[in-house]
Image: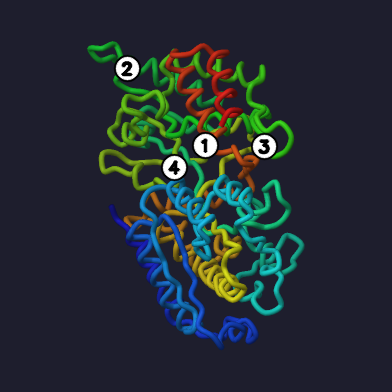
Amino acid sequence: MKKTTKTIAAFALLAGLLGVTACGESTSSASSTSSDKVEVLFWHTMGKTNKDLVDREIEAFKKLYPNISITSTAATGSYDDLQSKILNAIPAGTTPTMAFCYPDNVAEYLDKDAVANLDSLISDSEVGFVESDGSHTDSAGKTVYGADDYVKAFWDEGNNYVTSGTYSVPFAKSTEALFYNKTVFDANGWSVPTTWDQMWDLCRTIRAAYPDKDADGNYSYYPLGYDSDSNLYITLSQQKGIPYTSKTGDHYLFNNAQAKAMATDLKSKYDEGLFVTKGTSANATYTSTKFTAGEIFMSIGSTGGTTYNQTDNFTVGVAVPPSEDLNAPAVISQGPSICFFKSASKAQLRAAWLFYRFISTTDASNYYGISTGYQPVRTSSFESATYQKFINATGSSRTVFNDVASVTATMNNSYFNSPVFVGSAKARTEVGSMLASILLGSKTVDKAFTDAMTNCLVG
């Protein structure tokens, strides 16, 4: 795979970060923690490649704050594994200063009264946001910075909890994109669907054109694959206005007539051979694997997994996933945020906050996003000359990463965040398993919904 524009842009940003001086900081914030040595423990889930990127940012940060030591530790496994490690550390008093998180993780930490409310740090006169962190001009012609410079849905995720306050802040984000076999599309004259009605019409056209089955009676080709059963269910519920969950009151709302009708309809389309999901595939194979093998012509999956949707077997196209209503698009927001823990001292929290500000500036957010395929978290990053050059790259240097960045840059006003509470992660898992069982026919619709609701309620 060619990574020319991606690599050049990232190294240019890195050079800028490594050459920083304190001139970008307010005098008070640069000196406020300079008298004593402070250690910040940062736990995350980054693999070596991404950790190396952040380690370079730590190197640059130390030039500004030589008294602050950032110890970056990668937890083995997934976000759930990191959560388990943190939940075990809470009663022992050994939590880190800051850590990667998803909202469901933070809900669990909040329930243990372990995570810090960041509101005071955000507005602090010494260490709070400053305009040089990142700013842009809003629709009224006003220069805005601080929380207002972040993509709204990304920032709002951090105060979407049962308890009032800001308990997490965005680091890098991903969403879902429609990856399609452009070679086959061009050969057949197919148009990329923008609505679900168009999608199902196209899937029927593809099914008629590719009816082949293997010796076991399974289709050799599928029109569409969806990499996450949970995301398919939750996104369609959001687009159709079907109750899913609530962060207050009766949390689990998905066992309703509208949802059952949606699941029944999906079952009918699955039986037509129009689509498959990870949960319905043998050995729970990601549909991106079948997509790159040429066995699926479209796959909806995470932009964080763009690498798994690229191939030399054919030209890959990228588009916005279909909407129920183009006037009310809704796409899921994913990717790591960062939370801070109460067990840390005031000095540690202030130092950790300075580090967060540093790794989420306009340039730093661009650096990580361009280097990894994640999206920046600031509006000023998207509007910057560096990112615009990246998304508009042409010729042989353009890759699927440029295409993904170009597509997702148009989606910043379309994101939604699901309600977060203790048990919201369980709901997400259960509706995904529920949908897969309905599609496969291992459970009736009523039985699947009843079981999922029971599993949520009993924990």
Are there few (<14), some (14-19), or many (20+) residues within 10 Å of tag 3? few
**Disc 4 to disc 1: CB gap under 8 Å:** no
Q: Amino acid at mark 2?
A: Tyr
Residue 372 locus on image (x, y percent):
40, 57
Decide: is 313 above or below 411.
above
- Numbered mark located on residue 328 in the image: 3
Q: Residues within 10 Å of mark 4 (few under 14, many from 20)?
A: many
| Amino acid type at mark 4 | Val
The mark that comes first in sequence, 2 or 4, is: 2
> Residue drawn 73% across and 53% down?
164
Q: Which mark is residue 318?
A: 4
Residue at the spot x=65%, y=40% of the render?
419
Q: CA distance from mark 2 to mark 4?
A: 25 Å
Is residue 278 positioned above or below 362 on the image?
Answer: above
Residue 170 shows in this picture? yes
Relative height, residue 427 to residue 20 (above, below): above
Nearest the camera: 343 or 158?
343
User: Secondary structure beneath disc 1?
Assistant: loop
Going from N to C along the chain, the mark reached first, 3 or 1, is 1
Front residue (pair 458, 264) = 458
Q: List the residue tagged with mark 2.
A: 219
Residue 428 position within the rendered picture, expressed as x and y whole percent measured from the top left: 54, 34
Q: Is residue 413 left or right of residue 193?
A: right
Determine crowd level at label 2: few under 14, some 14-19, many 20+ residues with C-alpha closer than 10 A: some
Q: Position of residue 178 (x, y in %)?
A: 46, 38
